[in-house]
Amino acid sequence: QVQLVESGGGLVQPGGSLRLSCAASGFTFSRSAMGWYRQAPGKERELVASITSTGGITDADSVKGRFAISRDNAKNTMYLQMDSLRPEDTAVYYCRGGSSLLSRGSWGQGTQVTVSS
């Protein structure tokens, strides 16, 4: 059974940083495409960044140069380093994975990120 558990969210001031983690279990992590999505109130869920099993990375234009996705296959964990945070980054951030195709992956429960002074 695929399990994805996000952690690391919280309240941060504009310009600050957070690092999200997604601990995975129940599947072969090293073979899975993984991704971070976010959903702000009243908006659709959107892809923030993804990383393939071989390390290929895709970033949304809105986070390029500020966010960095990574994975540690030895720890079955994916990360999202978020720097220079803006109020518009406020959202629930979700981890997705468990399949070689990200679109077929399962979802974590989400972690709230709030950027506010």
Image (tube, rainbow, N blue to C red):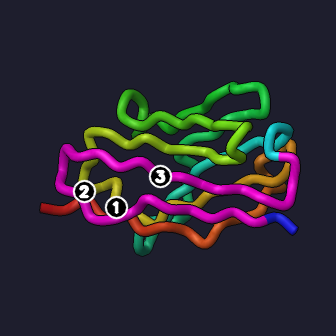
Q: Amino acid at mark 2?
A: Pro
Label located before the other in sequence (1 or 3): 3
Instruction: Check disc 3 and report the residue beneath it.
Output: 20
Rounded to the nearest angstrom, the CA distance separating label 2 from label 1 is 6 Å
Please state the extent of the stretch shown in magenta in the rendering: 3-28
Callout 2–callout 1 Cβ contact below 8 Å: yes
Nearest to viewer (mark 1 / mark 3): 3
| Picture residue at 65% right of the left edge, 66% below the top | 108
- Residue 95 among magenta residues: no
Q: Is residue 46 left or right of residue 61?
A: right
Where is residue 6, by image quadrant? Answer: bottom right
- Residue drawn at x 38%, y 27% is 65
Q: Residue furthest left?
A: 117
Please state the horizontal and vertical placement of residue 69, each as a whole percent of the image: 54, 37
Identify residue type, mark 3.
Leu
Residue 87 numbered tag: 2
The residue wearing badge 1 is 90
Please provide percent x and percent y for residue 49. 56, 41
- Separation of residues labelled 2 and 3 (CA atoms): 17 Å
Residue neighbourhood size for the residue with mark 3, other residues' Cα within 10 Å, grouped as few (<14), some (14–19), many (≥20): many
Amino acid type shown at disc 1: Thr
Q: Quadrant of the N terminus?
A: bottom right
Identify the image quadrant of the C terminus. Answer: bottom left
| 15 or 20: nearer the viewer | 20
Secondary structure category for the residue under label 1: loop
Magenta span: predominant SS is strand
Q: Is residue 20 magenta?
A: yes
Q: Quadrant of residue 52?
A: top right
